Amino acid sequence: MSRTAAVIGSGFGGLALAIRLQSAGIDTIVVEARDKPGGRAYFWEKEGHLFDAGPTVITDPACLRELWALSGDDMAQDVELLPVSPFYRLSWPDGTVFDYVNDDARLIEQIRALDPADVEGYRRFLDYSAGVYVEGYEKLGAVPFLDFRSMLKAAPQLARYQAWRSVYSIVSGFVRNEKLRQALSYHTLLVGGNPLTTSAIYALIHKLERDGGVWFARGGTNALVSGMVRHFERLGGEVRLGDPVERIETEGGRASAVRARSGWTGRFDAIASNADVVRTYDMLGDARGRRAAARLRRKRFSPSLFVVHFSTSGEWPDLPHHNILFGPRYKELLGEIYRGNGLPDDPSIYLHHPTATDPAMAPAGKSTFYALAPVPHLGRAPLDWDKEGPAYARHILQILEKRALPGLSERLEILFHFGPAEFESELGSHLGSAFSLEPLLTQSAWFRVHNRDDKIPNLYFVGAGTHPGAGIPGVVGSAKATAGLMVEDLLG
Ligand SMILES: Cc1cc2nc3c(=O)[nH]c(=O)nc-3n(C[C@H](O)[C@H](O)[C@H](O)COP(=O)(O)OP(=O)(O)OC[C@H]3O[C@@H](n4cnc5c(N)ncnc54)[C@H](O)[C@@H]3O)c2cc1C
């Protein structure tokens, strides 16, 4: 008789896990609260524009291709990945522009322009990044840390790469130009980490990008999500949309069934949750669940994001796809995002311009954008977002008009935003956090939510709150770790 599994939530982690289980012959159903799959990679279609809600920078495409290769399929039949260059355009208020490209000669030339002495330091940083990439990502990225022993085994590598230091501190040991320090350390923000406090292990992202490239799915990240769903359904899996799970039932200490808001109930041999880790423990509805959720609430959660979606008439041929507009302050701004209780006046902004790579993201002769600024989560800044949201959106657009999109206000068409309140209400995210638990060393690997629950042997976790953490490669790695356990537990 075939074994059955439910995956609660259809984020990248949930879908990757479901594909792995179904590929192994386990009958799997994904139960998603919202009307579309993808989780943070949701999307809206408005007046012919495609607005991706979340991830836009696709790195390590190999971890995605693996999901098709498991069943002898080819990702290319469902998804086309387009290379993006420059990876990012970084700019500062004084007019300095740095195109972060994968062409070594062009990269070095720009580093030399910032400070000739830093060329040598950058080379040594790249070696360091390559080392942590092998140890932290290749070897440990998809390994479940279920006991403290596994953590001790990783300790020598952590010590060798001085994992207790922050990314910014490690980078500063290699290069002295402040802008270059920012350029080589901001990446942790993409997984919810403060460059000033996130473990130096995360410096591996630089090598990940340089080796694997930066990609964009034709049709947007939503096309990658629908490609994953198509592949999963072709394998025989089922996706149930628009029906939030309210209860994970247990019997005799084991997870037995999920009950959704509609009243639909399904019994399964194993249950995995891709939903928020705090909310998942609440779904148990018993004393153990309440205790586990309370313990998690005491941990540090990553900040939220404020995302302004907009469209314009006309095209912007000189503007690349990914743009980082650093604000006038770096360390102080990070302090406000991670510890403050209000909205920074001078945010650093990530500007996403997908029509630069795929003009079909907008009707002919128009452009689609989003601008994103990290903001404190609702636990630190419990603001009235109905009031603050529209004003903050206008503030961000003004900065963009000055620094990247001259004449924007005359060409602006569609405008809407998604912020901390929506992360909480639409995605069920604790405190409206955009990336779940903050990726601190003390909240990583064994210290993060385990891929299998410690007490309920057939309850599993996948996604940003588990090891290794947020970001598409992270949650797809967590799916590999969790699937390994589930397949072993269910099929022996
Ligand atoms: C704006 C933004 C930009 C980002 N940019 C990038 C990027 O460029 N590159 C990158 O690699 N990463 C990026 N990230 C991070 C990355 O998107 C996330 O870490 C990753 O997508 C999270 O995946 P997940 O598997 O944890 O699931 P999530 O995306 O968190 O999905 C969880 C799913 O569970 C569902 N759910 C919750 N509760 C229930 C319930 N009770 N019943 C049923 N379903 C439920 C939710 O509706 C949701 O669909 C970005 C994140 C954001 C927010």
Image (cartoon, rainbow, N blue to C red):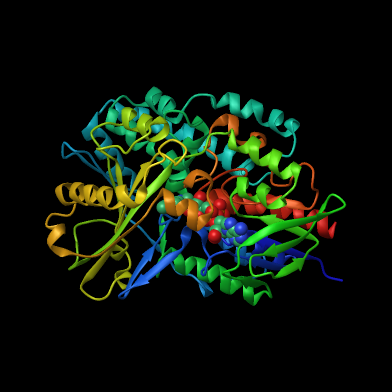
Question: Is 264 rendered above or below residue 466?
Answer: below
Residue 25, visible in the rendered structure: no
Question: Is 144 rendered above or below residue 273?
Answer: above
Q: Which quadrant holds the N terminus?
A: bottom right
**Side of 335 relative to 302 (left or right):** left
**Side of 400 relative to 265 (left or right):** left
Q: Measuring 61% from the left and 29% from the top, which residue is drawn there? A: 157
Q: Measuring 58% from the left and 25% from the top, which residue is drawn there? A: 160
**Side of 134 relative to 328 (left or right):** right
Q: Which quadrant holds the C terminus?
A: bottom right
| Viewer-proximal residue among 55 and 284 | 284
| Viewer-proximal residue among 113 and 16 | 16
Question: Is 126 rendered above or below residue 473?
Answer: above
Name the spot of residue 339 as percent of width and height, x first.
Answer: 41, 30
Q: Measuring 49% from the left and 36% from the top, which residue is drawn there? A: 202
Q: How many marks?
A: 0
Residue 430, visible in the rendered structure: yes
Name the spot of residue 357 as percent of width and height, x first.
Answer: 32, 64
